[in-house]
């Protein structure tokens, strides 16, 4: 059984690698974005509350996000493990995730951090924006998102590094190469 999370800056390939890890390890990949969309679409009480914030372009508060993640981690498809993508983003969320897992007498096995140079990410995201026609992804917006990532996640990464479960993997290069590095890192972390 593998319980893990993947962390990385915007454009680092987290979503792509999460899908590949999920397939290879046979664990469900859980993205907070997917959780939000499912709750909004299902018009759950938490979804209706989250929608208010999302419609205004605001972050969904921890209290709502935490409850959604707790509900999702109580579903039967996570019995063989899971891969969280996009949660936790703050140290308060780390503490809450610890509580959720402790309730089931579980803990995280590995935290995988995809690393990448900011300039490479800006270049990658500008290219993706041009391909998809996303006008909201301009250089200023991308740099702001990267700054937010660094501000928010440094403490989260440090917390997991202190626990000895953080594994860093270079997220730059061809997708298959990155996947091979990721799978080798996970295997090494699980053997430790």
Image (spheres, rainbow, N blue to C red):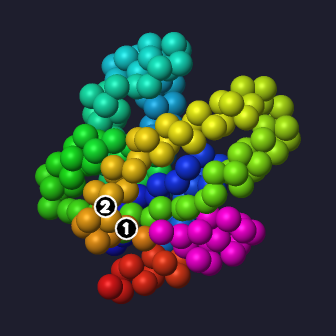
Of residues 40 and 109, which is closer to you in this image?
Answer: 109
Judge left or right: residue 34 versus residue 165.
right
Residue at the (21%, 47%) spot, across then down: 95
Residue 167 showing in the rendered view? yes
| Residue 4: quarter of image | bottom left
Task: Kindly check if marks 1 and 2 are in contact, taking CB atoms under 8 A apart as contact.
Answer: yes
Judge left or right: residue 2 versus residue 146.
left
- Magenta includes 174? yes
Whole-angstrom CA distance, mark 1 to mark 2, is 5 Å
Residue 30 showing in the rendered view? no
In terms of secondary structure, where does tag 2 sit?
helix
Residue 160 has which mark?
A: 2
Q: Which x, y percent locates residue 51?
A: 46, 18
Of residues 99 and 105, which is closer to you in this image?
Answer: 99
Q: Which residues are magenta?
A: 168-182
Of the two numbered discs 1 and 2 on the same chain, state the one appearing first in sequence: 2
Disc 2: CA contacts within 10 A as few (<14), some (14-19) or many (>=20): some
Q: Which x, y percent locates residue 131?
A: 85, 41
- Magenta includes 179? yes
Residue at the (71%, 46%) spot, across then down: 122
Residue at the (57%, 55%) spot, across then down: 14
| Residue 183: quarter of image | bottom right
Residue 166 has which mark?
A: 1
Quarter in which the N terminus is drawn: bottom left
In terms of secondary structure, where does tag 1 sit?
strand
Q: Which x, y percent locates residue 77?
A: 38, 55
């Amino acid at each position: 059984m593998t319980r893990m999370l993947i962390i990385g800056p915007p454009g680092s390939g987290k979503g792509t690698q999460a899908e590949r890890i999920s397939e290879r390890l046979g664990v469900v990949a859980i993205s907070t974005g997917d959780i939000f969309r499912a709750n909004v679409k299902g018009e759950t009480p938490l979804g209706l509350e989250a929608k208010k914030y999302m419609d205004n372009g605001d972050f969904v508060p921890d209290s709502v996000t935490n409850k959604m993640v707790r509900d999702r981690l109580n579903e039967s498809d996570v019995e063989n493990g899971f891969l969280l993508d996009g949660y936790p983003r703050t140290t308060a969320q780390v503490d809450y995730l610890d509580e959720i897992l402790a309730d089931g007498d579980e803990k995280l096995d590995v935290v995988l951090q995809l690393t990448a140079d900011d300039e490479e990410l800006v270049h990658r995201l500008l290219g993706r924006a041009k391909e998809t026609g996303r006008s909201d992804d301009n250089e200023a917006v991308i740099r702001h998102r990267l700054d937010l990532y660094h501000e928010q996640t440094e403490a989260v990464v440090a917390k997991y590094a202190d626990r000895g479960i953080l594994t860093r993997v270079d997220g730059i290069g061809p997708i298959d190469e990155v996947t091979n590095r990721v799978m080798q890192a996970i295997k090494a972390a699980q053997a430790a």
